[in-house]
Amino acid sequence: MLKKIQHLFVAAALAGTATLAAASSWPDAPVRMIVPYPPGGATDFSARVYAEQLGKILGKPIVVENKAGAAGEIGSQFVAAAPPDGYTVLLGALGSMAINSLLPSKKQQYKFPDAFEGVSMATSTPLAVVVRADLPVKNIQELIALAKERNGQLSYGSAGYGSSQHMTGEKFQLATGIKLLHVPYKGSGPALTDLIGGQVDMVFDTMPTLMGHVENNKLRFLAVTTKDRAKSLPDVPTLQEEGVKDFDVSTRYVLLAPKGTPEAIRAQLSDAMQQAAKEPSVQKAMAGQGAEAVPSAPDETYQALSAEVDIWSDVVKNADLK
């Protein structure tokens, strides 16, 4: 029995030594950065801006790979099940992952956030409330009045059921006491196309999606969802300024690794994220899309995962979700 215990201790020590050795030589091969959404969206944009700089800092390519489907669940599950060796990481939308873990209709094959280790926050961006220009409203209070008058007939498009765009709309309804008609799409692009075409009345969407349409005379920007005005839209008020109390919602993108990824690897990658965020080219690219680079330490990142679940749990509980 004693010899068996000694063998177990030796095996554990050797495994620990192997892990430390692997961590000390990381990276010695390209790193896959999985984006659980299609190319061209806000998450994909953040991943590609960071990946270019991270490759230079770490000395190995960071290969962005899109694994879209099921509102981000396919790519997230892929990373959750990957070897915890630092060579497969996830850059995802924090709000969507938290919401997916709460919705009763979502059957996850992994547990969020327990299936992941925190590496770093990446990007933060406000959402904006945007209506079609021929809708007879000029501000949020007029929008609320019209929504009450039409009693559930005003429609808003989203990037899909359970997306942060959808749930921001639900939170807005709870905060204002109105009813809106949710029209889910397969992404922000189709929703925005239909808004411009007049098929839906409004959207709650992220700034990287909307920035190319600020001057579009078929759209009207009414407010942003954060407590402070967006630097990219300084003339657009916040929802709080427009009388919607305690409304502070942003979409945040986060870099995660599979559970069990060594701390040394996560710390090295987090440090590289913080270096990348200081690069003028990164800051310029983010600002041009109405976003902000917000890197963080691994422990702060993991704390943010649980906090995001708390933010959306009341909305999921109280919203009339179908």
Image (tube, helix red, strand yellow):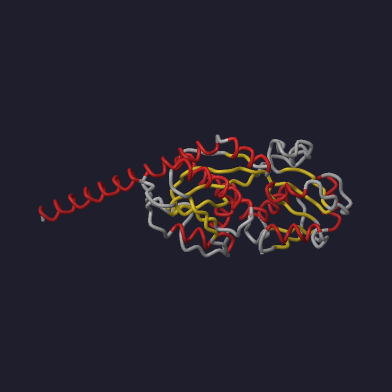
Pick the front one: 35 or 221: 35
Residue 165, percent from left and from top: 67, 54
* Residue at horizontal 60 percent and vertical 60 percent from the top: 38
Query: Which quarter of the figure is the C terminus placed in?
Result: bottom right
* Residue at horizontal 66 percent and vertical 39 percent from the top: 287
Whether residue 115 sits left or right of residue 320 in the image: it is left
Q: How many marks?
A: 0
Position of 282 relative to 89 (above/below): above
Query: Which quarter of the figure is the N terminus placed in?
Result: bottom left
Residue 104, percent from left and from top: 57, 62
Whether residue 252 sits left or right of residue 57 in the image: it is right
Pick the front one: 67 or 138: 67
Whether residue 231 sits left or right of residue 270 in the image: it is right
Answer with the quarter of the image where residue 167 lies: bottom right
Residue 60, percent from left and from top: 43, 47
Position of 180 relative to 121 (above/below): below
* Residue at horizontal 53 percent and vertical 51 percent from the top: 91
Residue 278, percent from left and from top: 55, 34
